[in-house]
Image (cartoon, rainbow, N blue to C red):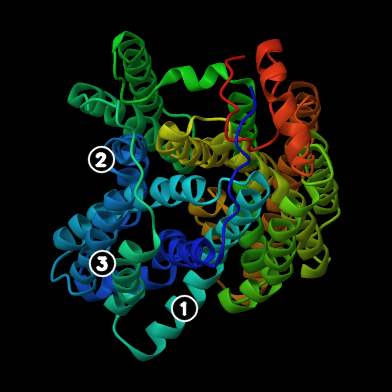
Amino acid sequence: MTHTIPARAGRREWLALAVLALPTLLVSLDVHVLLLALPRLAAAASASSVEQLWITDVYGFAMAGFLITMGTLGDRIGRRKLLLLGAAAFGAASVAAAFATSPAMLIAARAALGVAGAVLAPSTMSLIRTLFRDPRQMGLAIGLWGLCFSAGAVIGPVAGGALLAHFWWGSVFLLGVPAMVLLLVAGPVLLPEHRDPDAGTPDLVSVALSLAAVIPAIHGLKELAHDGWRPLPLASLATGIVFAAVFARRQRRLEHPLLDLRLFANRSFGTALGAMMSGTLLIGALMLFITQDLQLVEGLSPLGAALWMMPAIAANTVSFVVSPVLARRFRPAHLLAAGLAISVCGLIVLTRTGTTSGPATLATGFALIFLGAGPLVTLSTGLVLGSAPAEKAGSAAALNETSGQFGFAFGLAALGSIGAAVYTSRFTPPENVPAAARDSLADAVAVAQHLPADLARALLTPARAAFVDGLHLVAVISAAALAVVAVLILRLLRHVPPTGRAESDVDTRTDLDARRGRPLPFGHPVDRTPR
């Protein structure tokens, strides 16, 4: 028995990818655009400190909580239909946020944006799986998709700053409206519809359990990153873990589960998902340290810091585009391990930074980290989507996004706590300085603004040195952990062939590999064999 060679995508499919890039870019952009707008927003809307936290955080909570539900819902009702509904909801919620007249209205609009974002993210990924059946083309498409997601992190603050210079604070929420209108117009023409005809009806109890598992866990991790290992955040995290266990037990007993846990039986799927989460945990959290170093240690403005981060974005762009091409000649395990080795080199470079070394060393290390992260994002995502059955692509995409959310939150909690512990243990402020300066470098900088020049210098010099010491330790821990991840990837994915293998060779060996329990080629559409 042989399998039909996957059809290659044509101009229509690549145009459809361009349409899908819009919501991908905007979901990422909407996460970061609020960073510059929050001070003006808080003053204009008279938002309290608690309301400001909810305005900032509710988007991420809602998005993380509904990812699993929306990913599997797309498999049931149709991915294009759900994407268009999400685009309409995102546009409407953006307008509501832009013209909000009270903090409560803005919080509600941001929550709606989060739910709509949970629709857009897995829907775009699962539609890429449908559009690009040729594994080589799918790899390149995923690379371009990842590039758009990363671009949003850079464009968000820059675009937000430009809008705030000329318009009112609500204008930052209108960035996505024209793109969503274009998606609603072009989507029905260019995007195919795909659903699982045997998915059954959604289990509402499972939906509630998934929300009860994800939202408290994410909230607990976020609070641990801010406040340290205190009882309430730990209780929130424990609550999420308990509900996650109940959720998993229920999924195993349902004929049509909300989340098919049998996906994890595929070794390629589980390994790629774990690699993505580990990389996000260790690399994503470092962005916070690097941005703080550029602004609080080097004394750069937000725009100056963004410019010094551009080499990393350029390196990431090259890595996203080149990785799928290299995957046609080299095994994904080798490319993933090589990429992680480059990131480890970048982390080692970070340990050579100091309070007077200038931003060049930091920017170089950051660029190497992002250069090595390209294979991790593109190839791991391709393995997650390609090793899942086509009818479960929405669920696979949702798990991919959810793992990233958890990885980032846990990384901030764990690595942030380590950095904070080093700061407080190494920093001894001068006498007659407010105690708040002991909490973080940002607090020390804020206190120094109200002190005489000599006392401010005496405060900031040891504070910056203590922060850099924390950055060095976090970099060393991350480098060691990434090296372990690279070794595990080499072992667990060593049999997965490159995408460059001749199609005829792949097809003639597919059944034999499946019967012997060997992983099929990276992104191969029939790689469904349980491991």
Q: From the top left corner, tell me how far across and down residue 428 is, in percent.
A: 67, 48
Badge 2 or badge 1: first in the primary sequence: 2
Seen in the image, is 402 located left or right of residue 384?
Answer: left
Q: Which mark is residue 91?
A: 3
Q: Quadrant of residue 112?
A: bottom left
What residue is disc 2 on? 77
Badge 2 or badge 3: first in the primary sequence: 2
120 to 332, vertically: above or below: below
Q: Quadrant of residue 452?
A: bottom right
Q: Residue at x 29, y 37 (%)?
A: 73
Instruction: Name the secondary structure under disc 3.
Output: helix
Q: Is 510 in front, or is 444?
A: 510
Compute the Cα span from label 3 to label 1.
Answer: 18 Å
Q: Is 220 in front, or is 203?
A: 203
531 to 204, vertically: above or below: above
Q: Which mark is residue 159?
A: 1
- Which of the two discs, 2 and 1, sits closer to the camera? 2
